[in-house]
Image: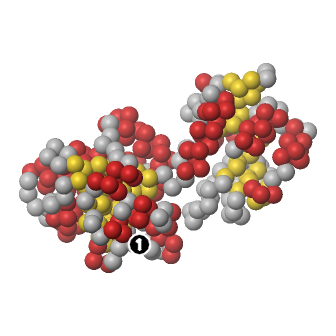
Amino acid sequence: MRSALRLTQALGATIHIGQSSGSELLARTIQQDGWLGSTMAEVASHSDTIVYVGNSLYAELPRLHSLLGGETKTKRLLHIKSRTNRRSQEGTWLPASDIVECPSLQLYDELTELCESLVARRMPISDVAKQLHEFLAPAINSAWVWQVDEFTSELDLLIVKRLLTIARHLSAEKRCSLLAVDPNPGRVTAEETLRWTTGLSPTATWKAGRWQKEDFRTGYSLDDWRSEFDYILLVRGLISDREFPQLPVDALFTSQLVVPQPQAAGPIQLRRAAEIDLPILTRSVSEGPNKNPSL
């Protein structure tokens, strides 16, 4: 991250710490409806019941189960999953008896029925909602846990809002919390480093010998950046089993060679992060036709 900051200064460029769609969805929910959140430490120390939601927890966060105290045999555990063709998402920490199969498009309906049954104090009709109702009934301190980047669509937004409604209802008499886990701690570290170094976050521009914030760029999408900047370099250190999305960038430096589908004109330069030579890169960008680069 510090090397990226030095490169930004050398080029007189703009640096931006990208946020995932899942993080943005979570922020929207908190702004619109509030939150009943928890921490990993609280779940590990106090929760007696944990409901895992989604397919990517095991692959993206393999140590999460042990960090939450799931291996101590003192917690009641359940995992809601949907069928997937991706082998990396077949794993789970739990035996088959503790897994609930639910298609992703059906999950919102099941959670809605569960919510209505809790309010009406009746047993749900559908099998999935009924199983969740029976599982949560004896819980004193329960937690719903999912991986942030797996829930990114408008339907996922409704699912998260429904989980919040369920948590609020259960918390009227007991304790129910939500834990959305970000699988990329590097994103948090990068944003903190940018804030400590420049006083700005998540975007900073080096101009006239100092770091500056340009408010008009707040909320820019990648398409906006394509028209605003002459050259876009994307640096990614996260190792993930998810395919790289289609991004309109000119060059990509990553810790793993995952070939993207470029939308920008011309071929994308692909290098491993360890192979980056900042002096050479700085010279190649600054000597080119690019007057307004972005990192």
Q: Nearer the viewer, residue 106 or 193?
A: 193
Residue 109 in view of the camera: no
Of residues 240 and 242, the one drawn nearer to the viewer in this rendering? 240
The single residue placed furthest to the bottom in the displayed view is 96
- Quarter of the image with the N terminus in it: top right
Count of residue discs: 1
Foreground pick, 48 / 20: 48
Q: Does residue 153 sit above or below 59 in this rendering?
A: above
Q: Looking at the picture, how far across and down is residue 161, in whole percent?
A: 31, 46
Taking 281 as reference, is 244 left or right?
Answer: left
Q: Say left or right for 114 vs 79.
A: left
Residue 276, percent from left and from top: 81, 53
Residue at point 62% right, 28% down?
199
Q: Quadrant of residue 54?
A: bottom left
Scheme of colours in the image:
secondary structure
Q: Residues within 10 Å of mark 1 (few under 14, many from 20)?
A: some
User: Residue 282 at what x, y percent from top left?
Assistant: 85, 42
Q: Residue at x 41, y 72 (%)?
A: 92
Name the secondary structure under disc 1: loop
Callout 1 amino acid: Thr
Residue projecting furthest to the top:
208
Does residue 222 appear in the picture of this structure? Answer: yes
The answer to whether residue 292 is above or below residue 127 is above
Q: Residue at x 16, y 65 (%)?
A: 134
Please provide percent x and percent y for residue 150: 46, 57
Q: Quadrant of the C terminus?
A: top right
On screen, 117 above or below 56?
A: above
Q: Nearer the viewer, residue 43 or 85?
A: 43
Residue at the image point whose x is 70% and y is 48% from the top: 234
Q: Residue 237's quadrant in the figure?
A: bottom right
Q: Which residue is mark 1?
A: 92
